[in-house]
Amino acid sequence: MIPYVNCYDDMELVRRFRFSRVSISKITELIANYLNFTERSYPASPHLLVCMALLFFASGTFQIICANGINISQASASRYIRDVSLGLQAIYHQFVSLPAGFKRVVKNKFMRLLTFQA
């Protein structure tokens, strides 16, 4: 785990990231293969990428505000959020299932809304 996360207890982690230390580690483990790593001198750890994205998702604020809190650039924050989002998208089907016919029902409701407004 990265030092940034180690300075908080579990209650504070949940308050800031909406996940506990164990959950952050599990998320990192599940999507690690989907994260892009560089061969730079100081590459970011998978935990940092996940924490940056979770902080952004939980806060509902601008990327630069979250980036400043972790002491990275806004451009790096944007890349981390994108990579984590794509990783989560790749594994969501393991945890989320929709009822049969759900997509059709939603599509029909949108069509009715569009027809009503036209």
Image: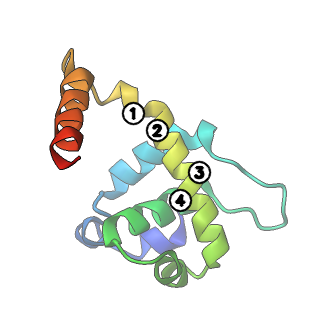
The answer to whether 4 is drawn above or below residue 65 in the figure is above
Q: Residue furthest top?
A: 100
Q: Position of residue 6 (x, y in %)?
A: 44, 70
Instruction: Locate residue 72, reporting x and y percent.
Output: 62, 78
Q: Which residue is mark 3?
A: 83
The amino acid type found where label 1 is placed reads Tyr
Cα–Cα gap, marks 2 and 3: 10 Å
Disc 4 packing (10 Å; few <14; some 14–19; many ≥20): many
Position of residue 12 in the picture relative to residue 44 (left or right): left
Secondary element at image label 3: helix
Residue that carries the numbered disc 2 in the rendered image: 89
Q: Earlier in the sequence, mark 2 or mark 3?
A: 3
Residue contact at pointers 4 and 2, CB within 8 angstroms: no
- Inspect this view and state whether residue 59 appears: yes
Q: Nearer the viewer, residue 4 or 72?
A: 72
At x 84%, y 55%, the residue is 39
Q: Which residue is mark 1?
A: 92
Q: Quadrant of residue 32?
A: top right
Q: Are marks 1 and 2 in contact (CB under 8 Å)?
A: yes
Crowd band around label 3 with a 10 angstrom C-alpha radius: few (<14), some (14–19), many (20+): many
Q: Depth check: give the residue in front, 25 or 89.
A: 89
Name the residue beneath numbered marker 4: 81
Q: Circle 4 — which element?
A: helix
Q: Mark 4 and 3 residues: CB-CB less than 8 Å, in contact? A: yes
Q: Label 2 sits on what residue type?
A: Gln
- Residue at 63%, 46% in the rendered image: 35
Q: Residue furthest front?
A: 118
